[in-house]
Image (spheres, rainbow, N blue to C red):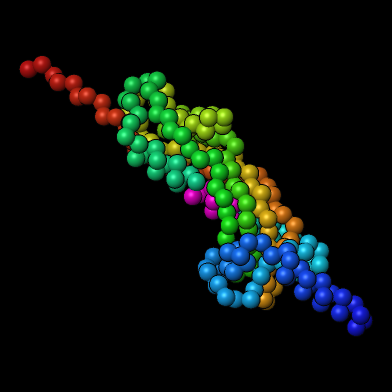
């Protein structure tokens, strides 16, 4: 038993000095700088197994990716609504912007640390819960998002967007004094926010004859 304990202690000591990622990551916890601390992330796979149920870690990764998705859609709508070019009032008018199709996460909470990409693969519109005068499209090869006026009627700008998301995270769990590398977490989901488009060109007023 003593021999096994000595072997494990030696293995952990060697790993701590040779397998730690870059210094900035090694010296952070909960997204804040703690330079000078002796805590380092451990990348040893099965040397230490998580006592946390796997589904709990899966849910935490999904929640992190969902937060990324929310921030990406908020950024998209801010760029659409602040674009110098406005969506025309006539049927067939289009407003197109280039967007970033992904965001890189490199931050941790009290228990888990996720590092990797959350990306958008597809956009669609729930026409049963959206302004019937508008439609959207997305070209993944050019990363261009387009909103189009498809009917000659006064728009409300209310949209229910479906955004298909992928995520793939390297995953660590906090163990008292250091991060322990777990299996990567990856998944897919559809984010379905209700948003408001407001960047319309004003239609000219028709003056009645006296």
Name which residue lies at 13% across and 19% down.
208
Name which residue lies at 55% across and 44% down.
102
Q: Between residues 135 and 70, which one lies in front from this camera angle?
A: 70
The dominant secondary structure in magenta is helix
Q: Quadrant of residue 101?
A: top right
User: Where in the figure is residue 114, as x and y percent of width and height?
Assistant: 63, 58
Name which residue lies at 38% across and 23% down.
93
* Quadrant that contains the C terminus: top left
Residue range in magenta is: 64-71
In the picture as drawn, the residue positioned furthest to the front comes out as 18
User: Where in the figure is residue 31, as x and y percent of width and height?
Assistant: 54, 65
User: Where in the figure is residue 111, as x and y percent of width and height?
Assistant: 64, 68
State left or right for residue 70 relative to residue 187: left
Instruction: Decide: is 32 above or below 194.
Output: below
Instruction: Decide: is 166 above or below 13.
Output: above
User: Where in the figure is residue 129, as x and y percent of width and height?
Assistant: 48, 37
Q: Quadrant of residue 134?
A: top left
Q: Quadrant of residue 176?
A: bottom right
Instruction: Decide: is 146 above or below 45.
Output: above
Name which residue lies at 43% across and 30% down.
96
């Amino acid at each position: 038993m003593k021999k096994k304990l000595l072997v494990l202690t030696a293995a952990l000591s060697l790993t701590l000095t040779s397998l730690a990622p870059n210094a900035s990551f090694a010296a952070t916890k909960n997204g804040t700088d703690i330079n000078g601390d002796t805590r380092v992330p451990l990348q040893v796979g099965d040397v230490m197994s998580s006592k946390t149920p796997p589904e709990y870690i899966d849910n935490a990764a999904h929640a992190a990716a969902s937060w990324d998705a929310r921030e990406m859609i908020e950024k998209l709508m801010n760029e659409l609504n602040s674009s110098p070019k406005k969506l025309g009032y006539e049927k067939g008018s289009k407003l197109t912007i280039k967007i970033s199709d992904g965001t890189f996460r490199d931050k941790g909470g009290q228990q888990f640390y996720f590092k990797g990409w959350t990306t958008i693969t597809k956009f669609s519109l729930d026409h049963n819960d959206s302004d019937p005068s508008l439609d959207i499209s997305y070209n993944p090869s050019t990363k261009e998002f387009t909103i189009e006026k498809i009917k000659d009627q006064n728009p409300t700008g209310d949209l229910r967007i479906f955004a298909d998301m992928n995520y793939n995270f390297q995953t660590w769990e906090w163990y008292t004094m250091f991060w322990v590398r777990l299996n990567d977490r990856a998944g897919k989901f559809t984010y379905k926010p209700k948003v408001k488009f407001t960047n319309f060109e004003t239609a000219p007023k028709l003056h009645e004859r006296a």
